[in-house]
Image (tube, helix red, strand yellow):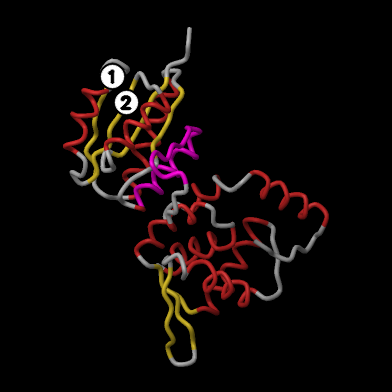
């Protein structure tokens, strides 16, 4: 017997693009996510057009909230996997953080992401999901140990201490390392903001940075296996490792 497919999608994009997602996945089961009421008018139209294809078609109303969508989609994917389905997720949405949540949940649970209508989709939040380990730890420590705000020197020392303890990594100069990732990675992505107090640099999580910091452990699990393998190989060869990406 052929394995059934399931499709999860946000309803707030163009109807034709959503129909393209159905064409790509040929689902027997579908769930429409209605984010802050957006796309509600599309759902009935799509349902009527694909009723010959699907045996179940449900909708879920959700707030525009990264964590809520991430958790909901993770649970939906797992439920469909338990039913023996191949799970497809349309990661296209008019809300960048919702696209990121859809993508993260899909990668976390092993579904197949689709981007109908956006073959070269550029989503800043998707870059967050591909952050290397060190900036993820900067966010983690800033949130966990400093309640979202710290002086650069204090943050640097704690980040290096945490990496040594949790990842068996070492580096002599933590200040330069943390400063590099703040200026080259975290600030351009809008995850932190900085200002000076006297002669000291202060760093603070933005709302987007806080959302990522709360999910750091999930993002670390999404790191490419190749990167993890390379880190483990270097750790075996060198007792003292100079941190890179």
Name the residue rendered at 44%, 54% in the picture. 122
- Residue at which label 2 appears: 30
In the rendered structure, which disc, 1 or 2, sits on the residue that comes first in sequence?
2
- Residue at which label 1 appears: 56
- Up-down relation of residue 187 to residue 104 (above or below): below
What is the crowding at mark 1: few (fewer than 14 residues within 10 Å), some, or many (at least 20)? few
Q: Would you say residue 102 sits in the magenta stretch? A: yes
Is 50 left or right of 109, judged from the image as shown?
left
What is the crowding at mark 2: few (fewer than 14 residues within 10 Å), some, or many (at least 20)? many
Is 202 left or right of 18, judged from the image as shown?
right
Q: Are marks 1 and 2 in contact (CB under 8 Å)?
A: yes
Instruction: Tell me which corner region of the image, top left, top right, bottom left or bottom right, holds residue 30.
Output: top left
- The location of residue 87, given as percent across then percent down, is 43, 27
Name the residue rendered at 45%, 80% in the picture. 202
- The location of residue 154, given as percent across then percent down, is 53, 77
> SS for tag 2?
strand
Q: Return the residue nearer the eye: 24 or 200.
A: 24
Is 113 left or right of 238, judged from the image as shown?
left
Q: Return the residue nearer the eye: 142 or 125.
A: 125
Range covered by the magenta-colored residues: 97-119
Name the residue rendered at 49%, 52% in the picture. 129
Q: Would you say residue 2 sits in the magenta stretch? A: no
Name the residue rendered at 80%, 60% in the picture. 239
Instruction: Tell me which corner region of the image, top left, top right, bottom left or bottom right, holds residue 44.
Output: top left
């Amino acid at each position: 017997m052929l394995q059934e497919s399931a499709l999860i999608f946000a309803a707030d994009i163009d109807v034709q693009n959503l129909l393209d997602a159905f064409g790509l996945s040929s689902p027997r089961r579908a769930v429409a996510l209605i984010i802050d009421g957006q796309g509600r008018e599309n759902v009935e139209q799509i349902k009527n057009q694909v009723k010959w294809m699907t045996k179940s078609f449900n909708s879920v109303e959700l707030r525009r909230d990264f964590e809520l969508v991430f958790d909901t989609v993770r649970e939906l994917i797992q439920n469909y996997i338990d039913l023996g389905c191949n799970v497809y997720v349309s990661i296209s949405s008019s809300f960048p953080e919702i696209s990121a949540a859809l993508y993260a949940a899909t990668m976390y649970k092993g579904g197949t992401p689709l981007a109908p209508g956006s073959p070269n989709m550029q989503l800043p939040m998707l870059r967050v999901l591909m952050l290397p380990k060190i900036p993820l730890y900067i966010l983690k420590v800033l949130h966990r140990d400093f309640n979202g705000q710290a002086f650069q020197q204090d943050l640097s020392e704690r980040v290096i201490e945490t990496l040594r303890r949790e990842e068996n990594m070492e580096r002599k100069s933590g200040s330069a390392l943390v400063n590099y990732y703040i200026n080259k990675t975290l600030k351009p992505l809008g995850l932190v903001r900085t200002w000076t107090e006297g002669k000291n640099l202060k760093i603070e999580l933005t709302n987007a940075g806080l959302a990522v910091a709360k999910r750091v452990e999930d993002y670390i699990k999404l790191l490419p296996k190749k990167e993890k393998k390379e880190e483990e190989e270097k750790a075996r060869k060198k007792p003292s490792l100079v941190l890179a990406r």
